[in-house]
Amino acid sequence: MEVFEAVQARRSIRAYQPTPVPKEKLLRVLEAGRLAPSAGNKQPWHFIVVTDAERREKLAQAPFARFLKEAPVIIVGCGDQKASPKWFMVDVAIAMQNMVLTATSMGFGTCWVGSFGESQVRELPKIPENYRVVALLALGYPRKKFDLTSKVLHLIRRRKPLEKIVSFEEFGRKPQNLSDYRE
């Protein structure tokens, strides 16, 4: 799968098969995160892989995150705020997006989770003080599930067209014809 195909195919998956993620595939997803760019090449990230059912259940206590207990893998993305005070959050986000796209290209489902109590998440895997939890990433094989909320949301909130989100040279400046920029 080409990168752009992975970008197009990626969806937030909230229902997973209980099938474990093979270790070599999990390591490839993690390697994609390791290879991400970072400000000053500080690489201020640390990723905690959680596969234990009890720990996943505890991480799933946050509102909007109950589905986490079903994902066979949860990756806790942490950033070292001392190593990179201004950029650790951006750097960890870039690394985790690399993981998302790699996982998608391999046929896995993922869901980026930003709804969590940081103190609760920090406590479970004993995260040191200088690290902040940036996001949680559910990972596993998608389970077919009819999700009415998701279907309705995608009908109501479609992706905005490029013409609404892109300016050229200065904010608000639109070309006469955006199709001049398309191939």
Image (tube, grey):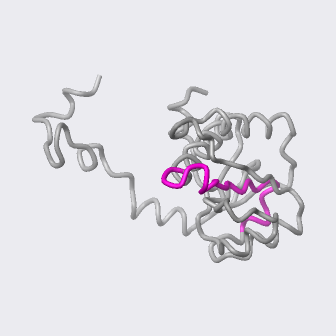
Q: Is residue 116 left or right of 21 when viewed as pictured?
A: left
Along the line of sight, which residue is nearer the eye, 136 or 21? Answer: 136
Q: Residue at x 19, y 38 (%)?
A: 168
Residue 30 belongs to the span the image colors magenta: no
Q: Is residue 141 left or right of 63 when viewed as pictured?
A: right
Q: Residue at x 38, y 52 (%)?
A: 159
Note whether 149 is above or below 138 in the view shown: below
Specify the segment rendered in magenta. Answer: 67-87
Note whether 108 is above or below 58 in the view shown: above
Note whether 120 is above or below 8 in the view shown: below
Q: Is residue 116 left or right of 5 when viewed as pictured?
A: right
Note whether 72 is above or below 35 in the view shown: below
Along the line of sight, which residue is nearer the eye, 53 or 44? Answer: 44
Q: How many labels were placed on the picture?
A: 0
Residue 15 lies, in percent from the top left, at 71, 60
Residue 70 belongs to the span the image colors magenta: yes
Q: Quadrant of the C terminus?
A: top left
Residue 10: which quarter of the image?
A: top right
Residue 64 lies, in percent from the top left, at 62, 73
Residue 105 lies, in percent from the top left, at 65, 34
Residue 176: which quarter of the image?
A: top left
Q: Residue at x 62, y 41 (%)?
A: 43
Q: Quadrant of the N terminus?
A: top right
Judged from this view, the residue extending furthest toward the left is 176
Along the line of sight, which residue is nearer the eye, 159 or 111? Answer: 111
Judged from this view, the residue extending furthest toward the top is 183
Residue 13: which quarter of the image?
A: bottom right
